[in-house]
Amino acid sequence: MPIFFWMNRFCSFEKFLVLYELRNEINNGISNVNQAIIIAEVVENLGYSLVDIEREGRGLLRVTIENQNPDELITVGDCEKVSHQLTYTLPVENVPFDRLEVSSPGVDRVIKTAEDFIRFNGLEINLKLRVAMGNRKNFTGVLQGLVKGSVASRDAVWGLLIEPKPGESAMLEFTLADVDKARLVPVLDFKGKKS
């Protein structure tokens, strides 16, 4: 089936781009796009957003969700609701799994899509590249957002303000294809004291 027929028949172009990006960005994840679409549709029909899908050893399928309004936290009840629905839907749709885990992104949230890189602009992240730049793969810095190109372009260049030496700053430029893993640096506030 041609991809454009599939796209027009089952989802909007924007949703297709997100799912396509999700498929490309999941390293140890589901190889079958149809399985990712099934999971995304269940999650979205329940009023949540899909953050990540992972496959782990011994049949573990891990689904990470968040509220469509990112200011609202995910509760255990939310995870239970999605887990309950997926437990019934996945076997009917022939999506294999032995164990299912549904969770919130947590304080060290994974950053995968272009929308995530825009949303978390100005926040500190840990970035691991697929190929070393300047003899390093791991960087911590403040995300600067889109530097060159357009968000929809695969060649879009993103920026990370890093501190190579104390007191110095430099801009690391990368594409989403360069990224192995990216996560927010947790900021915890205990009685007004951030750590």
Image (cartoon, helix red, strand yellow):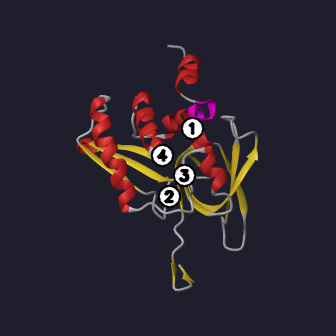
Q: Which residue is mark 2?
A: 109
When the figure is inspected, residue 158 is found, relative to residue 125, above or below; the finding is above
Instruction: Bin the neighbour count of mark 3 within 10 Å (Cα to Cα): few under 14, some 14-19, many 20 and up.
Output: few
Q: Nearer the viewer, mark 4 or mark 2?
A: 4
Q: Which residue is mark 3?
A: 68
Mark 4 or mark 2, earlier in chain = 4
Instruction: Bin the neighbour count of mark 1 within 10 Å (Cα to Cα): few under 14, some 14-19, many 20 and up.
Output: some
The reply to whether the C-beta atoms of the residues labelled 3 and 1 are less than 8 Å apart is no
Q: Which residue is mark 1?
A: 18
Q: Main secondary structure of the magenta part?
A: helix
Q: How many marks?
A: 4
In which quarter of the view is residue 80 placed?
Answer: bottom left
Q: CA distance from mark 3 to mark 4?
A: 9 Å
Q: Residue at x 58, y 52 (%)?
A: 135
In which quarter of the view is residue 56 placed?
Answer: top left
The reply to whether the C-beta atoms of the residues labelled 1 and 4 are less than 8 Å apart is no
Mark 1 or mark 4, earlier in chain = 1
SS at badge 4: strand
Q: Magenta segment, which residues?
A: 12-18
Q: CA distance from mark 2 to mark 3?
A: 15 Å
In which quarter of the view is residue 43 placed?
Answer: top left
Q: Nearer the viewer, mark 2 or mark 3?
A: 3
Q: Position of residue 22 (x, y in %)?
A: 51, 39
